[in-house]
Amino acid sequence: MLKIYPNLEFKASCPQDGVTLQWLGVAIPGMRCLADGICPTCNARYYADLPVSHALELPMILNRETGEIYDPKDVEWFRRPLKEGFRAPIEEEIVPQVHRFLECDRIIIVNCLDYLYGHCLLKLLNVQRHLDEHPELGCCVLVPSQLLHLVPDGVAEIWEFPRSISEGGKWYSSLQRWINEKISNYQECYLSPAYSHPSHRVYDLRRFVRNLPDLSDKIRDRAPIILFSYREDRPWGRTLQQQQQKLQNLYERLSRIFPEMLFVLVGFGRENRIQNTGAEVLDLRAEKFEVERDRLWMAYMSVADCAIGVHGSNMLLPSGLAKSTITLVPRSRLGNIFQDTLFPHNLHDARDILLQYRSIYGSEDLSDLRSSTVAEIAIALLAFQQQQSFWFKVGEEEISSPEVSRVQQFATQYFLPFPFRPLRIYGKLTLRVKNFLNDYLERLDER
Ligand SMILES: [Zn+2]
């Protein structure tokens, strides 16, 4: 927690002569939380990153006269929004809409703005920590409109910033002025460190995901529920056409084993279509964000037996809500592994994490990642996860053996050795070969 008003409790040195900077105030023009300062020796004016979110580890200092950025760790993706934002500030008057719930004299600001959806959501998860650990401070949450419905109960104010998430990296002069004026109305003001990757020990997703539609009528007699978190900018395959093929194959393989399955598609985009050849397909994708649609997606995530999708922020909520998750990991995402995963609050045994969260690694375009592999891991999860988890708990806690569901029966049959598997499990080609062999054997018998 960092005090920013009435005085700023922060230290930084002039990059040119190392003298401690003097502060004139703070500047929060968007995703960046900055200290506005001057060097008493060389008189240079600076904006210095305050220790918030990614700037905790990657602090930069911007020279206001030259636009030069001192970036000791040389991190281009984090430097770019600062550089571009400062160079081309938005002068249009855009200020947050205030939703006030509590009156407070002392506040803590959680700045959730960012130009990436995942970063915004992860910063938002810090709110719970402040509600629980600093009840004496009114929590004020600066969020883009797209996350408004996920702000937990108990906050003092929501400052809804009416711009899309992708525009969150820009520099809004009006926001900078608005926040400075706003904080001067309070006795004291702190800034949340808004950690970039909070652990499940400090958040419980149920406090953020609320008011979901009731699906009990829609999912009656449907099992398992498989959810695919769809995206078009990072497809599973070389092209969207290949993604289409892979999705169709995945659906058909699972459909053969689970005729009562519900296969749900969520996410943005409309390009690919799954042709219904057996089990029910529910296509809930959309072109753009809409809050009721988002709630519907989260409702299906919460009842999904398995959520599948390509690595990225599209997997955050599915991984936190579904009973199991399969993440398809392209080569370039290996350095970000599990950053797109939210764990449930009640996870105690590390083995349950390994059971529940599976990653499959592929080439950069994931074209080498076959639908049969993904299907098999999903079937294995449905067949064995519950039973394996039970065995891990025997002797650790009071637990009785779980009942075997129909889904589990079907899934287990898939792993029986070749002659014992039920016929419907085999694909069209295998069935044709089997029929051919049967015909041939019958003809042999006839001779
Ligand atoms: Zn200086």
Image (tube, rainbow, N blue to C red):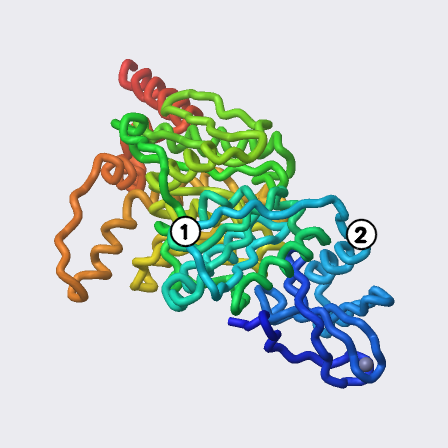
Local crowd at mark 2 within 10 Å, few (<14), some, or many (≥20)? few
Q: Residue at x 38, y 51 (%)?
A: 153
Q: Picture coordinates of residue 189 (x, y %)? A: 54, 67
Q: Residue at x 58, y 33 (%)?
A: 288
Amino acid at circle 1: Pro
Q: Picture coordinates of residue 355 (x, y %)? A: 34, 55
Viewer-side residue, 71 vs 181: 181
Amino acid at circle 2: Ala
Q: Picture coordinates of residue 253 (x, y %)? A: 41, 32
Tell which quarter ligand 1 is in.
Answer: bottom right
Q: Is residue 267 left or right of residue 427?
A: right
Disc 1 designates what residue?
152
- Report helix, strand or loop for mark 1: loop
Q: Can residue 373 be seen here?
A: no
- Report helix, strand or loop for mark 2: loop
Farthest residue, direction top: 446
Earlier residue among tags 2 and 1:
2
Residue 289, image quadrant: top right
Q: Gap between marks 2 and 1, in whole Å?
A: 34 Å
Viewer-side residue, 430 vs 63: 63
Residue 265: image tag: none
Q: Is residue 250 above or below residue 181?
A: above
Residue 406, image quadrant: top left
Q: Residue at x 30, y 29 (%)?
A: 219
Viewport quadrant of the C terminus? top left
Viewer-side residue, 170 vs 109: 109
Q: Residue at x 81, y 66 (%)?
A: 64
Q: Picture coordinates of residue 387 (x, y %)? A: 23, 51
Viewer-side residue, 225 vs 249: 225
Disc 2 designates what residue?
88
Local crowd at mark 1 within 10 Å, few (<14), some, or many (≥20)? many
